[in-house]
Image: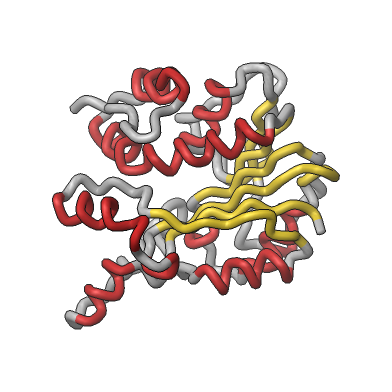
């Protein structure tokens, strides 16, 4: 299976996407990268605008790799459960912490950018203490980028209208339990505000490519749909 860079709009020279695809060649890795390609594209465009010297990625992930490739002069630290697939570079650090255990949160070093993508829906604790904790890692003038699925996306509404549960069951795997709670745009914005952060911008978009014709049509219609019906939510916030 080949991993193709997103076609519109392309990353600068598509170098970051091509390099990450060349590193992760297992079929399930290629599928995941293809599915999330446009989301990564958006993340890197926002990060490029910020131009961070230091980044903290919540949950070592492909985001860690993309950011290291796109910003080779930046320090990209990680937080959460360590994942051997995404090794640190020299001079970078990892903070081991269970985000569900809000009583054990450690002190964090300040960073220019904190990235928390596709994480909070996997937690079984309220989002406010988690976001408040992450806010302590955002330096003055810094930013937090938050990405998560939209609980009220159109495909989920249609499945529910047909009597089907739009959400997968919780998995019997503590390391990958699935989604405990997906958020609406309003829920997410309210949680960011309650955590003491100020929303700089937010958007919704159909940036997940599931490979089906129905999904292709849904993504093509994304710009014409109300934001509450689109599949992904991205929020950019800064200290209040």
Residue placed furthest toward the front: 224
Residue 151 placed where, x, y %?
41, 69
Image quadrant holding the N terminus, namely top left
143 shown above or below 191: above
Please identify the quarter of the rendering in which residue 112 is found.
top right
Among the 4 quarters of the image, the one containing residue 163: bottom left
* Rendered location of residue 55, percent (x, y): 68, 34
Location of the C terminus by quadrant is bottom right
- Compared to 105, does 159 lie above or below? below
At 40% from the left and 25% from the top, the residue drawn is 17
Q: Name the residue rendered at 30%, 37% in the picture.
A: 34
Between 85 and 43, the residue placed more toward the observer is 43
Q: Residue 13: image x %, image y %?
A: 42, 18
Judge from the rendering whether residue 137 lies leftward or rightward of residue 225; answer left or right: right
Q: Nearer the viewer, residue 30 or 162?
A: 162
Q: Is residue 56 above or below residue 101?
A: above
Residue under the image location 27 percent in, 27 percent down: 3
Is residue 144 rendered to the left or right of residue 206? right
| Residue found at the very far left of the displayed protein | 213
What residue sits 37% from the left and 37% below the top? 37
Viewer-closest of 164 and 105: 164
Residue 226 x/y as whole percent: 40, 68
Taking the image as shown, residue 178 lies to the left or right of residue 191, namely left
């Amino acid at each position: 299976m080949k991993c193709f860079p997103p076609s519109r709009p392309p990353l600068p020279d598509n170098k970051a996407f091509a390099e990450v695809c060349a590193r992760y060649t297992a079929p399930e890795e290629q599928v995941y990268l293809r599915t999330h390609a446009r989301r990564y594209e958006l993340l890197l465009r926002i990060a490029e605008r910020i131009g961070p010297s230091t980044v903290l990625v919540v949950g070592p992930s492909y985001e860690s790799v993309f950011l290291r490739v796109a910003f080779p002069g930046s320090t990209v630290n990680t937080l959460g459960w360590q994942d051997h697939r995404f090794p640190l570079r020299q001079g970078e650090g990892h903070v081991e912490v269970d985000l569900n255990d809000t009583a054990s949160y450690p002190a964090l070093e300040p960073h220019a950018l904190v990235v928390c993508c596709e994480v909070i829906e996997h937690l079984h604790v309220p989002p406010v203490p988690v976001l408040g904790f992450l806010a302590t890692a955002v330096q003055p003038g810094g930013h937090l980028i938050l990405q998560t699925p939209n609980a009220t996306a159109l495909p989920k509404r249609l499945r529910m209208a047909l009597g089907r549960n739009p959400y997968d069951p919780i998995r019997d795997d503590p390391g990958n339990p699935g989604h405990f709670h997906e958020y609406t745009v309003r829920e997410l914005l309210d949680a960011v505000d309650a955590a003491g952060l100020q929303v700089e911008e937010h958007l919704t978009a159909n940036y997940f490519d599931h490979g089906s014709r129905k999904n292709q049509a849904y993504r093509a219609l994304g710009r014409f749909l109300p934001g509450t019906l689109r599949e992904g939510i991205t929020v950019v916030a800064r200290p209040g």
